Image (spheres, rainbow, N blue to C red):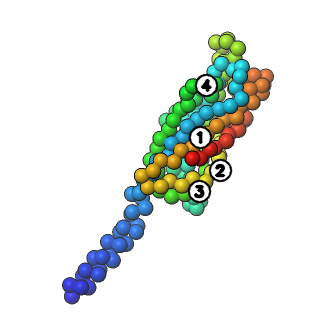
Amino acid sequence: MNLKRLISVLLLLSIILIHFLPYSLKGKIELRFTSEGILKITHLYLNISSIYIHKAETGDYGWVSLSNNPLILDLASKNTSKIIVSSLNTGFYDSLKITIKNCSFIYNGNETINNVRIQEMNLKIDTKLLIKINEKSSCIIKFIINEEEIIASKSFKPKVNLIVS
């Protein structure tokens, strides 16, 4: 009789562990933002309203928020890059989604802020990223800037390279 109880308890514990253990195993993701292609613009402010990452093989329901706090990047800054570090469940992730709220720039030493029309407000970036237990995965999000288009037409079509390390 005691052996049956022991087996039942072990079976129940195994089921609980199998169900809840994957959600308790965490790793970290670090996002860094940088840019290239800026020579004449003094400041290029990009206001990001949210950043999400998508867990692989979860359909439309696998989006996890990395940041819902507004983030303002100065893509013309040579010596700083904003960093976001977030805790994530372990596993494979297959894309990032960045929502841009607005963009503006200062050009040629003039302190006048010029608003820029953004051609794509929601950027979806495909990736292959593995989050491991107690480890940090790093991603560099590099905006490729067409400076002449921004200055001449006050229009910005974001192009992004993602470097995973």
Q: Residues within 10 Å of mark 2 (few under 14, many from 20)?
A: some
The N terminus lies in quadrant: bottom left
Q: Which residue is mark 3?
A: 60
Disc 4 residue type (three-letter): Lys
Dot 4 falls on a residue whose secondary structure is loop
Dot 3 falls on a residue whose secondary structure is helix
- Mark number, residue 78: 4
Q: Nearer the viewer, mark 1 or mark 3?
A: 1
Q: Which residue is mark 1?
A: 140
Disc 2 residue type (three-letter): Asp
Residue 101 visible in the shown view: no
Q: Residue furthest front?
A: 165
Q: Residues within 10 Å of mark 4 (few under 14, many from 20)?
A: few
Residue at position x 69%, y 20% in the image: 41
> Do labels 4 and 3 touch, CB within 8 Å?
no
Q: Earlier in the sequence, mark 2 or mark 1?
A: 2
Residue at position x 29%, y 81% in the image: 7
> Do labels 2 and 4 touch, CB within 8 Å?
no
Cα–Cα gap, marks 4 and 1: 15 Å
Dot 1 falls on a residue whose secondary structure is strand
Horizontal arrangement in the rendering, residue 163 relative to residue 149 (left or right): left
Residue at position x 28%, y 76% in the image: 9
